[in-house]
Each structure stands twice: as C-alpha cells, then as structure tokens.
Image (spheres, helix red, strand yellow):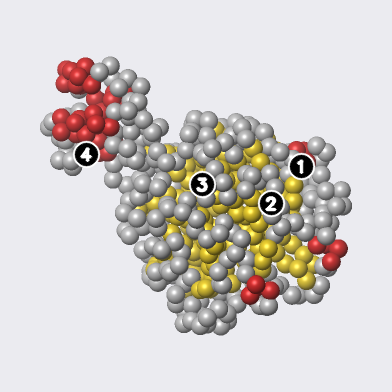
Amino acid sequence: MTRAMALCVLVGSASMIGVVVPDVSGAMEWSASMVLNTNAETDLDSDYRPELATDGQGNWVCVWHAAVPGAQDRDFDIMVARSSDDGATWSAPAILDAAGADPLEIEDDFSPVVYTDGDGHWIAAWYTYDSRGGTLGDDTDILVSRSTDNGATWTTSAPLNSDATTDHLTYNYCSDTSPRLAYDGNGHWVATFYLRRTNIEDEYDYDIYVSRSSDHGASWSDMQLLHASLSTDSGEDTIPQIAADTAGSWVITYKSTNLVGTNGVDDEDLHFSRSTDNGVTWSAPTALNTDASTDGLRDGYSGGLDILTDGTMWVTVWVRELPPLVDYDLMISRSYDAGITWSPPENLNPDYAVDGGFKDLDPRLGTDGAGNWVVVWDGYYVAYFPWGLDHDPVFMRSDDGTQTWSQPAPVNTHAYIDLSWRDEDPVVVASPHGQWLTVWFSTYNLGGTIGNERDILYATSCVPVIDGDQDCDGDVDLYDFFVFQDCFTTTGPVASQCGNLDFDDDDNVDLDDYAVFQGSLNGPGE
C-alpha cells in the first residue's frame, strides 16, 4: 500500500476496522496481572525474586529461584522462562543449571540475575550452597551460566569467585552473595558481589569484589577487591549495584558503614567507585549521598538500592530510614558527568512527609533510552492508600529525564481488590522500542485460577518511542495505520486510547497528525 492509497482509505473510512491497542494517553497504564510461570495452576511450591532482561528484539528471559517440585528438603533451584513475542507468551519454567537438575544436588541456589548484550549472549549469575561434590565447601559461592539461544539452553554453571575451591579451607566463616552484572556494549562485562572472609564468628567485615570477562562470560578474571582501602576497613560494605555506558564509564554503588572523607558515624551511607578501564582499576570510595557527613540516617535500608544509566544521565535510587517514626522512603540522586559528581539526595515518593510509618522498599529503575524512566518498588502502606493491608508493586513514570514524576500508582490491577495478599520485589525493564514489563512474585491467586503459594506475575505497558508505533514493535506499519484510521476524527475530543496519536495536542486526530504519522512509516506495507 502506498502512502497516497493509505490517505485515500483513511479519508474514505474513518473506522473501517476496530483494533484493540494499549491506552497510552496520560498516565502510563499496565495490563491486567498475568502469570509468568505457566505451572502456577498445579505447582505446590513457591517462586521468589524474579529478574528480567530483553535484547530489544522481542526476546525476554526471566530467572528466579523456586523450590523444585518433589525435591527433598525443599531444594531451591534457579528457574528460567523465556518469551519471543515481547512477553505475550512464556515457555514452561525449567531448571536453568544442568548441575542442579541432574544429578539432583539438594543444595539451595538463590537470587539469580540475568543480563544480555542484545547480540545473542545472555549471562545468569546467582549464589549457591552447592558444594559440587565437596570441591566448593559448605559456604556460599557465586555461579555463572551462559546462553546463546535466548535462554533455551544454558551452559553448566561454573564458579565466578576465583577462590571458590579454596576459601572454605582458609577461613572458618566465608560467604559470597548478591552478584550483579553490567555490559558496556563494547565486549566488556563486569560482575560485582560482596563477601565475608574471617575466622571470627561474630566479625562481619563484608567487602565488595569485582571480576571481568571479555568473552561473554566464558571465562572470568581472578576476583579483586574493589579498592585497596577496603582491605583495612572494619565495617560492612554490601549490596553492590553496577551500571556502565558505551563510552567506557563504569560505576558501582553500595551500602557502607565505613567512613570516607567527612562521612558521619553510626549510620549507613551510599558509597561509589568508578572505573574507566573496564573494571581493572577503581577510584577510591566516595560518599554518593552528599549529606553523608550530617544526615545520621540509614541509607540503602534492607538492600534497597539501584543504579541505571541511559548513556547520558546516571540515576541512583535507594531506601532511607527517616525519623521520627520507623519510616522507609525513597531517595534519588543524579549524575550528569558519568558518576563523577552526584546531585544532593531528594525524596522521590511525594507522600514521604505524611505517610509516616509506612514502607517503600526495594526500588528498581527502568529506562527506554528515549527519555522515559520508571521506578517500581514494594509499597507496604497499610491503610494509607486504598490498596489494602498488603504489599503491592507501585510505580511512578517520568517522561522528562526524572525531573518530574507521575503520582504513585499500583502496577498490579488487582491491588484494589486483593487487600491482604502479598505482591513483592518488582523489577521493571523496557525495550528500546517502548515495550515495558514489570515482574514480581505474589501470593495472589488471580481470582482462584492459580494456587495461593507464591508465583511469578507480570504486567506489560506500551509507551511508543516512535510517533505512531501503537504496538511498540519498533515499526510504524499497517497495523499502526489501522489504529490511526480507527482514531481519525476532526471533531474531537480525542478518545483516550488515541491520545498518543494527537501529535499537535489540538484534541483531534486529523490530517495534521496524519502528516506526522506518514513521516514515520517504516514497516511492512509502507
């Protein structure tokens, strides 16, 4: 169909075909909650802490840990499911690691993460109690596995912490936990995690370590301390998060009770280090929250910390415990110079001053790289909001580079009716063409269609980054033309589901808007 033919069809019939499309006008809208683990109706065990990644080409991989059905002693293993249609359907859950399935190792694996370079390589990492026949000891170690077929198959896992076979022989108390991954778009990967090495039972001097890979996780460098200064401190450095851009900047931020610079004492602050040589060396730790010398507050409470960059701006969000009540609220700081300097902390959730005693936990960031940002978190509001006495995944969206945000709202559409179920630990990820997914674990049974144990739920949203791309597939094609045709009007007001096609904001979807739409046509049928 030529553009001229399309215009004739458009003018001749303003509603020749009806198309169901996401409502992208005004506030961001999420689909009804859907179950991601397709065995939810029949499984009897719980699923926890999902993580999510996409290659931007319609492929998504979700990993989580779950008690394997039928396993003895409630053995937790790493599960994986994948989608090749932007989250519309998902494969059946499978045990990711062959060593965890055959032979059955009856050792727990927890808290996986997954990341992709967008070019066919996927890496998953987690921590494990599996001794691998006694070779790794009875401590926790970091395991890593790779996929080159969008999560369909994975290599047998191998230790990432390079002392995994010897640490338990040297120390009475040792553990490695909470791995995080980043990729710079230029062939370099960095993993970070925190660990404990001591012969003293009540000594908890945790430190941050890193390891590097230049072959997409096939091999990793010997692990190294983030910075030499961590070898002489005595406090706790935990929950590292990492981000990288394509220009060679890497930033790790983490929670610490150690003093750096003019830090205050007896509280927890956020520290950060930077690398410009792909993780070989890192700058001395510096306080990220610029009020560290005076705040006297707990930052990064309960692991609540995340960092993300869109390549231009770097954003950190975290949980701060605020007085006088035990009130946990969200903070935000930004960097415009690749993490060298950071803006003063600001309260992110607008109700922080009046929601005393209610909890905002575990924030996570997502961005499409086109100016849209979303923060999701676990909101436990009791009766402050009309969302019941339970935990719900809450979100806010910014379309101006995190300067202003929409009002907090639940991601889960059942938040207003479930009242006492638990929806926890949400994660949000966006594709470069505007498809968003949020995933979390929940005890809600979806109206009795699944069990009451914890399952993995998700919701989708479409926020086009190309004018006219109503289904967020990266093309403005005949599908989008039929949507435009169905929305065409010169009398207004524009229908709510058509607001994204009113490019000149005159409350009509008319020929002026069609000129913009026509200029974006780039898909089949152009």
> Which secondary structure, mark 3?
loop
Front residue (pair 391, 139): 139
- The CA distance from mark 1 to mark 2 is 21 Å
Disc on the earlier residue, 4 or 2: 2
- Residue at coordinates 76% horizontally, 42% vertically from top-left? 100
- The CA distance from mark 4 to mark 2 is 49 Å
Horizontally, residue 374 falls left or right of residue 168, namely left
Name the residue carrying label 3: 185
> Which secondary structure, mark 4?
loop
Can residue 178 be seen here? The reply is no
Name the residue carrying label 4: 503
Q: Are marks 4 and 2 in contact (CB under 8 Å)?
A: no
Name the residue carrying label 1: 100
- Residue at coordinates 32% horizontally, 37% vertically from top-left? 466
Give the image location of residue 405, x and y in percent. Answer: 34, 56
Name the residue carrying label 2: 220
Numbered label tally: 4
- The CA distance from mark 4 to mark 1 is 53 Å
Give the image location of residue 172, x and y in percent. Answer: 83, 68
Front residue (pair 409, 148): 148
